[in-house]
Image: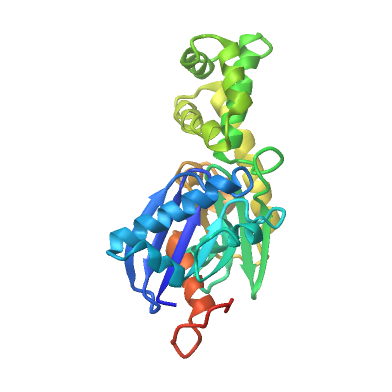
Amino acid sequence: MDHLIAIDGGGTGCRALVATMGGVVLGRGASGSANLMTDPEGTCRSVVEAVEAAFADAGLPAGAMRRSGAFLGLAGANVSRSGERLKAMLPFSDCVVVTDSVIAMEGALGPADGVVAILGTGSVFVARSAGEVRSIGGWGFVLSDLGSGARLGRALLQEVLLAYDRVHRPSALTDEVLTRFGNEPGELVAFARTAAPRDFGTFAPLLFSFADRGDPVATRVLDEAVKSIGEALDTVKPKHCERICLLGGLAPLYAKRLESRFQHLLKPPLADALQGALALARKAFVPAGGLPAGVGHE
């Protein structure tokens, strides 16, 4: 192997970097959505595009990726052996595919114990204690991913329809959202029929913005989401936990809303998920002696 590749992919986008076997970053790239469960073929394209961009940024030929070891952390890689199927489609010398929560935990905690809550388009909660790792959630927004941007957006659109039908009281927020659909509930339903998780997630920031203004619908939806996050943290958190890291685009918005029992445990992450993927790539492909591992090492 000539280089290491690290990849962090989720519903919002895919990031990649290329580094020397010693871990020195040479180039970075980015591309579109990379959720293995919802779009395996699109994920493969996004991964390759992000890596090609990283190699171009490093001034390296794209063909060099075929002599590189890649460590990928991707949303949806924990479902139905999707990671194994992706590996056969990728042009790398060797690769490891894990769920994105694994690389996020490595980046945020380093070698330490603690809890990581990833709160973005999807959501997942991971804890490490005395070498044992436990993960909950991350099964996709249809049945899981409570508190995620996708679930928030879907809940909001549901409230808009309930307000339109006068089952629930309308609010400034529901009026604002319906206006975006030309005040036509049928347009909203048509959007939801084909919307991907990231599409629902685009409405999540509105909830936080309107909740800060006291909007009752936004407050109700967010209160339920915060309750779900608290239940997940209580379930996954080790007895003597000293660190909780909130990650993802919604992390700073949720941090101040979590219950008081969590506030003293909140700590900033040591590094991001992409750096976590690079650290795991070095463990996977560079043996203790520091020389590149042979092809097929995993």
Residue sitting nearer the eye, 19 or 217: 19
Residue 11 point in image, percent of width and height:
53, 44
> Residue 191, located in which quarter of the rendered image?
top right
Q: Please, is residue 35 above or below residue 16 in the view?
A: above
Residue sitting nearer the eye, 5 or 126: 5
Residue 59 point in image, percent of width and height:
27, 64
276 left or right, relative to 197: left
> Residue 102, located in which quarter of the rendered image?
bottom right
202 left or right, relative to 137: left
Could you tell me if residue 210 is visible in this image? yes
Find the residue positioned furthest to the bottom: 289
Residue sitting nearer the eye, 124 or 26: 26
Q: Which residue is drawn at 56% across and 65% down?
A: 242
Check the image and tell me how it is coloured: rainbow
Could you tell me if residue 265 is visible in this image? no
> Residue 218, located in which quarter of the rendered image?
top right
Which quarter shows the C terminus? Answer: bottom right
Find the residue positioned furthest to the front: 63
Find the residue positioned furthest to the left: 59
Q: Residue at x 57, y 47 (%)?
A: 41
The count of marks equals 0
Residue sitting nearer the eye, 125 or 243: 125
Q: Please, is residue 253 above or below residue 14 in the view?
A: above
Which quarter shows the N terminus? Answer: bottom left
Q: Which residue is drawn at 46% across and 51% down?
A: 14
275 left or right, relative to 242: left
Residue 117 point in image, percent of width and height:
57, 53
Residue 78 point in image, percent of width and height:
66, 56
Q: Please, is residue 223 above or below residue 171 in the view?
A: below
Q: Please, is residue 298 above or below residue 49 in the view?
A: below
